[in-house]
Image: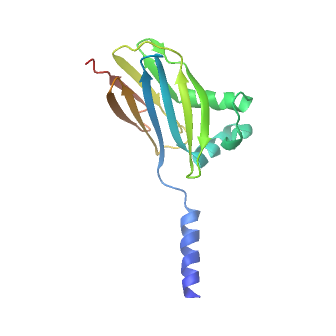
Amino acid sequence: MRLIAIVVFFLTATSSFGHEYFFAFAEVEYNDITRKFESTLIVSTHDLEKILKEKDNELGDLKNIRSGSTSHEALQSFLVHHFRIKCGESIAKMKLIGHEVSLEGTTNFYLESEPITLNGVLEITFDLLMNETESQQNKLTLYVRDKSYTRPFVHNTRKQTIKLETN
């Protein structure tokens, strides 16, 4: 009986507290042939769903959002507002081409830009969920021509500049 009481205590103690840290990840690759950025954003499903439900009840359940629906368009608008790539004076116009909700509690969002020409410097904004969660931490890894660049994004550093190596 004592063992059952201890197990119940630990189960309720851990489930009653939310997690302390919030993370999102982006992997971005520039495709020289198509001249497009191909991106995957990886976000905690329940954190994003909670925020989406607060903003728009139609967007709450990510697994039920279908491509081409008004919910898909609203989701795309939300994501690209918080994930932007600027090349010189041009901003890469991103499109949500799909998403997958995993059993591990994350959702992968697949985005692709319209063709854009690279210059030597990129300015990237990745403040997804930072307006709602001050402890949100995001990380981006960019792959361009056999080089990789990794940058952290936190509440007071929502924008990063990446100078591309030329060789």
Q: Position of residue 97 (x, y in %)?
A: 60, 28
State left or right for residue 76 relative to residue 33: right
Quarter of the image where one finds residue 100: top right
State left or right for residue 25 relative to residue 50: left
Q: Is residue 60 visible?
A: yes
In the rendered image, the residue lying farthest to the bottom is: 1
Q: Position of residue 95 (x, y in %)?
A: 59, 24
In the rendered image, the residue lying farthest to the front is: 33
In the rendered image, the residue lying farthest to the left is: 167
What residue is rendered at 53% in x and 30% in y?
A: 82
- Disc tally is 0
What residue is rendered at 33% in x and 30% in y?
A: 148
State left or right for residue 167 relative to residue 53: left
Q: Is residue 48 above or below residue 148?
A: below
Q: What is the image's colouring?
A: rainbow
Q: Is residue 151 above or below residue 32?
A: below
Locate the C terminus by quadrant.
top left
Q: Is residue 130 visible?
A: no
Quarter of the image where one finds residue 54: top right
Q: Position of residue 104 (x, y in %)?
A: 55, 52
Locate the N terminus by quadrant.
bottom right
Q: Nearer the viewer, residue 76 or 9?
A: 76
What residue is rendered at 44% in x and 30% in y?
A: 28
Q: Nearer the viewer, residue 132 or 143?
A: 143
Q: Position of residue 137 (x, y in %)?
A: 44, 42
